[in-house]
Amino acid sequence: MSETATPSFPKHLLDFRDWNRRQVESLLETAQMMQEVLARPVKKVPALTGFTVATVFFEPSTRTRISFELAARRMSADVVSFSGTTSSTVKGETYRDTLRTLDQMGIDAYILRTDAAGVPYQAHSWLHKPVINAGDGWRAHPTQALLDAFTLREKLGSLEGKKIAIVGDILHSRVARSNAELLPMLGATVVACGPAPLLPGSLPGAALTTSLREALYEADAVMVLRLQKERMEKGLLPSLPEYIAAYQVNRERLGWAKPGAPLLHPGPMNRDVELEGTLADSPQSLVERQVANGQAVRMAVLYHVLVGKS
Amino acid sequence: MKGDVLIKNAKLVDGRGVHGTADVLIGEGRILSLSGGEAPTVLDATGMILSPGFFDPHAHLREPGQEVKEDLQSGLTAAARGGYTDIVSMPNTTPVVDNAEIVAALKKKAAQIKQARLHPAAALTQGQEGKVLSEAHQLQAAGAVMLTDDGKTNEDAGVLAQGLLYAASWGLVVSVHAEDAGLRRNGVMNEGSVSFRLGLPGNTGYAESARIARDLEVVRYVRDRLANSVSAQGLLHIQHLSTKRGLELIRQAKQEGLPVTTEVGPHHLTLTDEALNGLNPIYKVAPPLRTQSDVEALIEGLLDGSIDCIGTDHAPHTQDEKELDLLRAPFGIPSLEVCWPLLYTELVEKRGFPLAVLVARFTDGPRRILGFPPLHLEEEAEASLVLWDPHSQRPVEPQTFASKAKFSPWAGWQLKGWPVCTLVEGRRVFALE
Amino acid sequence: MIFKSKLLNEDEVRRALTRIAHEVIEKNKGVDRLCFVGIHTRGISLAKRLVDLVEKFEGKRVPMGILDITLYRDDLTEIGLQPKVRETRIPFDLNGKAVVLVDDVLYTGRTARAALDALIDQGRPSRIYLAVLVDRGHRELPIRADFVGKNLPTSKSEVVKVKTLEDDGEDAVELWEMEAS
């Protein structure tokens, strides 16, 4: 039997620092194959039989954790899930001790979500096992960016030369940062837009603006981020009505983008805050595709990161 | 050519310079011609000077909530008598002007009063409490031209920074009352030889310069932070500059290209802390009257442009309030009706300050700070003008003021340069009989 | 790798496929409920040929699917690089069908075993047959082919390469030797 090998992949997915375009495109092709598996009546393949995968979520999240767990189970891995809230003191010790304890139970790979950036890197040095980052603080959320890219390509084809606008609280968003890292790798230009106190001074991979009009102008796709109430409480934003008046993506403003430009949202959505409710239900919204594709993408990630010797 | 008003034989002086005499025909709210024409109303302006209407970026009109001291009717009328066609009103009222509804209501009422035009400033933080940012976008949409917590000082640099970031993204200037609350120490007058001799708590000039220094660093931070996303023009406007040291800091910052502007009030150019020797709370103001060395430096700064404009900081209070003792009387000096004649007499007449520069500081300077286009005496320009008399001398008589605050530190001063007629968009809102 | 010899030429390949097609029709007693599923990569071209031949002989075009067995391999933890997951597409209902799995070479039997698991996850055929162009021996599992183009005894250091017109520009079966390391 002849076989074509994929390019070799790093044995972890923390962000896209040590990934190249070829690896990303190869992974997205694998995700397409996984879609077929998910279309079967029996949604299971034995590729990860005998593997034990642990989801270790120190920040609450239902949808991402379930998405990963299902992905692992569909690949026939055994899944263990740990959810913890961090204690307010000595967080580093809590993460390290928790992970080391779990490691005694024979875990083959970790899917990690933490409120502090960088813990996945630390985990890698504590555990010497594959780590998949499910979101560390504001820094990175690589599988989200992959499923966003996958969903966009489904709709738009190649992303080469396409303008993608990201709107919202960019400063605190790992979704924005990972997309700003990944989408230019696939040839797209990214414009990140939000109120000045919620916009970083600089962001590699993205042009920045406080003008919603400038961001949406002729955009091929619009990604809308969730606004968290804490931002008002921390004095970074005047009020919810002000945010809606100035930055809500509504039908009129979406008209500045290219006709039919798809809408993405990483969820969960504050209906009628960051996005006008009727738009969320319109055919332009790809939010449901994002969730479905998250499965296929995560299966592909598990395949590439876990299968084969390191 | 036919118009509504013809101003004959006026000398024209605006921010560009001193021009010759002309017959100015006004109609349809504009200057139709500088070479005469026909009009039903003819004003003989021989010996008088015509300038663009004065613009005050800083006045307290006390409405809503404090109408016993002043209201829009009395304040905007007083302004027109002082040659002002445009006033920025401060938001430290009761309630504070921090939402779009109040801004819209003020604009509507001012439009009906038909005196000087009103450009409301809104609070930088909700309630001016220094914690939560106000809704700048909605405030701007309702007509606010500036954000400020004036009345209070911005103690938290972090909040100021977030406020500047947000305001800059809408192109709104933020004004600050720059005084360090800690260094001020509840001083009722300038801390110096006079306060030490009189035994009154002093407010050191370093409270102002320390705060200006801090705020300039905040401006640097905001400018750098926005470098990739917004081109920030005038970010910060420092109100009522009163010290030589503060001026030095601002001059240096401007030389570096920092987007800051500043203003000075008529009282800080004509009075010193020696005035408190009379122990009259009429002279109690924040920031306080300083020393002669400060006065000289500020005049120099006004001349070289380090100071962008004159801001009256018109602060009316009731007679009862200003007759409280020096520790308890409120701070503030009203000056809308005397500001121009005072500075014309004291600076131009007595010191040879160039007239056109002074006019620029009353007209182009404030407009530039707010991002308005300049107004000059040319055909098709809006006819918002003041005709004033550089020759006849009259004393300051507070009892004749239109303002409810019928007192003045300059009562009895013999001044020239009194406005004779003020027009807003071609309509006469004030005319001396 | 070093080329050793050509085991089957173009004509011999074509004759082998013709014979397999006849045998399938005979075994199945016609084309009723018959379908072919080709295993990536060359099994697909071979399956297409068989479908064409069956149509030529019986006048009916039976359905065809393609199968990728990468996710069913039993050696995923041992190999170095990951093999590329390719398309599986069976655009018809497998239930009750007589499926002929088609591959180019039958060797250890592990690919066939994986293909059986992959196929059964897609539905419940009434019967599964295995057709290969070459059976080179050295079974490691109890697997046998129902239809064989050619039996070719080989040694473990040898590699059997099947070339098809569609994939390689010519029909041939070649024997190569792995270089001694």
Image (cartoon, rainbow, N blue to C red):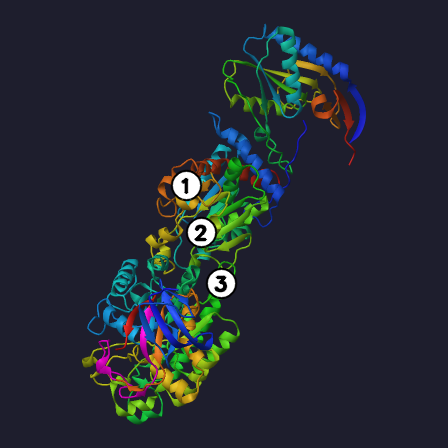
The part of the image, by quadrant, that contains residue B411 is: bottom left
Say whether residue C22 is visible: yes
Real-space CA distance between mark 3 and mark 2, rounded to the nearest whole angstrom: 18 Å
Q: Amino acid at mark 3?
A: Arg
Helix, strand or loop at label 2? It is helix
Q: CA distance from mark 1 to mark 3?
A: 35 Å
- The image's mark for residue C82 is none
**How many C-alpha atoms fall within 10 Å of the one at disc 1: few (<14), some, or many (≥20)?**
few
Instruction: Give how far across and how far down residue A89 sits, in percent.
Output: 40, 59
Mark in the foreground, 3 or 2: 2
Give residue B351's position: percent from left, percent from top: 42, 88
* The label number, if any, that marks residue A63 in the structure image: 1
Q: Is residue C46 above or below residue A106?
A: above
The front one of B164 and B276 is: B276
Mark 3 crowd level (few <14, some 14–19, many ≥20, 10 Å Cα): some
Chain of the residue where label 3 is placed in the rendered structure: B
User: According to the image, label 2 marks what residue?
Assistant: A212
For badge 1, the amino acid type reads Arg
**Residue B326 at what x, y percent from top left?**
24, 85
Which secondary structure lies at badge 1?
A: helix
Question: Which residues lie in the magenta part?
Answer: B397-423
Q: If you read the primary sequence from the N terminus, does the residue marked by circle 1 or circle 2 appear first?
A: 1
Query: Viewer-proximal residue, A296 or A272?
Result: A272
Between disc 1 and disc 3, the foreground one is 3
Question: Which of pointers 1 and 2 indicates the residue nearer the eye?
Answer: 2
Residue B422 lies in the magenta stretch: yes
Mark number displayed over residue B225: 3
